[in-house]
Amino acid sequence: MHTPPRHGPPLGVAIGLVLLGIGSVQLGAGFAKLLFDDIAPNGVVWLRLATSSLVLMLWARPHLRGRSREDWLVAVRYGACLGAMNWGIYQSFSRIPIGVAVTIEFIGPLVLAAIGFRRPRDLAWVLLAALGVLLLGFERGHLDPLGILYAVLAGAAWSGYILSSAATGRRWEGIDGLAVASLVAVLLVSPLLLTVDTADLADQRVLLLGAAVGLLSSVVPYSAELAALRTLPAATFGVLMSLEPAAAALAGLVVVGESLAPVQWVAIGCVVAASVGATRATRAGVHPDVIPT
């Protein structure tokens, strides 16, 4: 059977686009954490989601008429997961290092990937990830327990986001579902603005940096990775996305000045290796290949 060409970029360019997306997401996380000195995390979450929602709605211009009740329920569930994921991880960022937060968050999609395992020996990847989390515990004196819990919440929401993404893709064309879900997420987190000083939101510097966070964390990586997926197999894409925890740690070090203990770097390495192994084990199965917008 003849397979039509995918009309994607060359392999090397596609890989570069994925790496660009990863770097952009984590750079956005670093700038977001810098904003915490000027505005509460709830305000940064809203600014990020509002910026990405505005751009995605203008980009997609989703067709909304004639949608079934099931279509809207799927989109709302998708948006709820998106909102919870962003809120949880930003609350975590405000309490523990970015690299540690993303490493813990990554366990959610990794466990979801483990569901697709067919061979008992593949469970070794789950054990390796568990070892990484335990190693993080050796530096528990520097980690706020509440920050850890928020990262776990973000990881659970990320898993729900991946599952909802698949369901949304079956009911909405192109990026219409993502655009609508982003708008839903903004509406759901908007009550959090009651906890934010309105004077902070009116500050021009805060607005500009908040918009930059939204673009870096959502629009740029989504555009880059959407183009890359026209060339890269899903399994290869999943392996590359496994670099997220290490990239987060580097962003925390370079942008925010967060230094990690050697054992924490080893822990991050364990989770990265486990994610690579899990992705290869599941091949085209479920893996953390969805951009957290």
Image (spheres, rainbow, N blue to C red):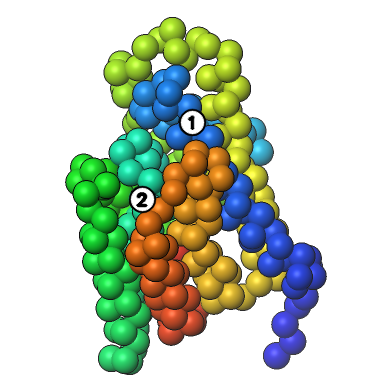
Residue 7 in the figure: left or right of residue 282: right
The CA span between labels 1 and 2 is: 16 Å
Residue under the image location 29 percent in, 60 percent down: 136
| Viewer-nearest residue: 196 or 52 | 196
Residue that label 1 marks: 34
Residue 188 in the figure: left or right of residue 291: left
| Viewer-nearest residue: 146 or 163 | 146
Residue 105 in the figure: left or right of residue 208: left
**Residue 98, image x, y percentages:** 42, 47
Q: Quadrant of residue 113?
A: bottom left
In the image, is residue 89 above or below residue 187?
A: below
Residue that label 2 marks: 101
Mark closest to the chain's N terminus, 1 or 2: 1
The amino acid at mark 1 is Leu
Q: Quadrant of residue 58?
A: top right
In the image, is residue 116 above or below residue 88?
A: below
The amino acid at mark 2 is Ala
Circle 1: is it few (<14), some (14-19), or many (20+) Cα within 10 Å?
some
Residue under the image location 54 percent in, 76 percent down: 235
